[in-house]
Amino acid sequence: MAILKVLKLPDPRLKQVSAPVESFDQAVRDLVADLEETRLAGPAAVGIAAPQVGVLRRIIIVDVSTRPKTPNHGHLVLINPEILHWEGFAIGREGCLSVPDYTGNVIRATHIRLRAQDLDGVEHLYEMEGFEARAVQHEMDHLDGLLFVDRVVSRRTDLYRRQVHQPAVFPRVKAQ
Amino acid sequence: MSEWNLLTLVGADRPGIVARVTRVLYEFGCNLGEASMTRLGGNFAIMLMVSSARSPGEILDALKPVAETLGLRIHLDPSTGGLHQHLTPNVQVRVFGADRAGIVAEVTEILAAQGFNILELDSDVAGESNRPLYIMNIQGYSDQTLESLIEALAPLAARGISIDVTPVDLLIG
Ligand SMILES: [Zn+2]
């Protein structure tokens, strides 16, 4: 186990699309263990994505279980995750281990249905909402070379939250 | 040693203000930091952190021609804080109500008495012109619980002002 170096903007590797995981071997387990150690070593991050440590594979970790009053599925290792369906939107404030000293408002879907594999390659379906859904969308963006700074909306946008926003601001369902 | 200054420019809105002002600053060798620029009424207001090895007087002189051409008033204040003094808001207060005098003062006086530090405040007037609706969104930092803020604001809610106090959950990932 080791704490890995977290890439910071403008490292070009953060802008690349990560490749799917095909073999669920010990190397993947070792990477996930290091990723988790790295996540816990930094400022209270609820998630981390493999490309943040320079490994361009579709692996994320999300854990919002330590937050009070937050619906969650516990500690999740999500491999090759895909959002099958999303609903609703909300603005929330985000920061990123890869973007020090900056936070901004981002629109995310409030409910998602997610399919992902675990460390053994077994597929699982999840229904997620709120903060956990936001965390998954933030981390999945990293797999497609997107950072929250690519999605930041104006502070004033929130004044108009009752208007309908186009779904174009939501993440793509699936990276082809 | 370059120092940070807060540069304020205000004038009637027209296309090209930002481009022409920042071009002058760039060619004068200034660095730009955090900025907030917005159209308010028919005016365009720029607040911009600027650093330069030159003196504040020299920066003002450099901007004078463009400011005169565009009809902008300029103000330059030394900034003691510098960049990266970001405070992260943890509470959001949204206010909706029939537009009337005093609504901002009433809300913000209550927040100030609670030790609430306003970091951002945006407001707008919506609705029909004969029945305007005042909308205000405040983000700030408070040590108080949400419940105590809600309770402090309750007298206003009882007078027909809709007040919504929610936590700003910062996600780091
Ligand atoms: Zn991130």
Image: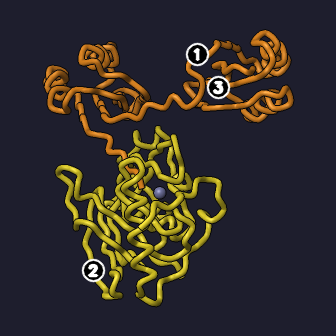
Chain colours: A yellow, B orange
Q: Nearer the viewer, residue B132 or B53?
A: B53
| Res. A166 mark | none
From the image, tell me which residue sits under label 2. A125
Q: Mark 1 is on which residue type? A: Thr
Confirm whether residue B96 shows in the render: yes
Q: Mark 3 is on which residue type? A: Met
Q: Nearer the viewer, residue B131 or A140?
A: A140
From the image, tell me which residue sits under label 1. B80
User: Marks 2 and 1, Cα distance to the nearest angstrom?
Assistant: 52 Å
Q: Is the residue at mark 2 from the same chain as the one at mark 3?
A: no
CB under 8 Å between callouts 2 and 1?
no
Residue found at the very far top of the displayed protein: B57
Q: Is the residue at mark 3 from the same chain as the one at mark 1?
A: yes
- Residue B92: image quadrant is top left
Number of numbered markers: 3
Mark 3 or mark 1: name the one nearer the start of the chain.
3
**How many neighbours does mark 2 have within 10 angstroms: few (below 14), some (14-19), or many (20 or more)?**
some
Looking at the image, residue B77 lies above or below residue A142: above
Q: Disc 3 is attached to a residue of which chain? A: B
| Res. B49 mark | 3
Q: Nearer the viewer, residue A175 or A60?
A: A60
Looking at the image, residue A132 lies above or below residue B126: below
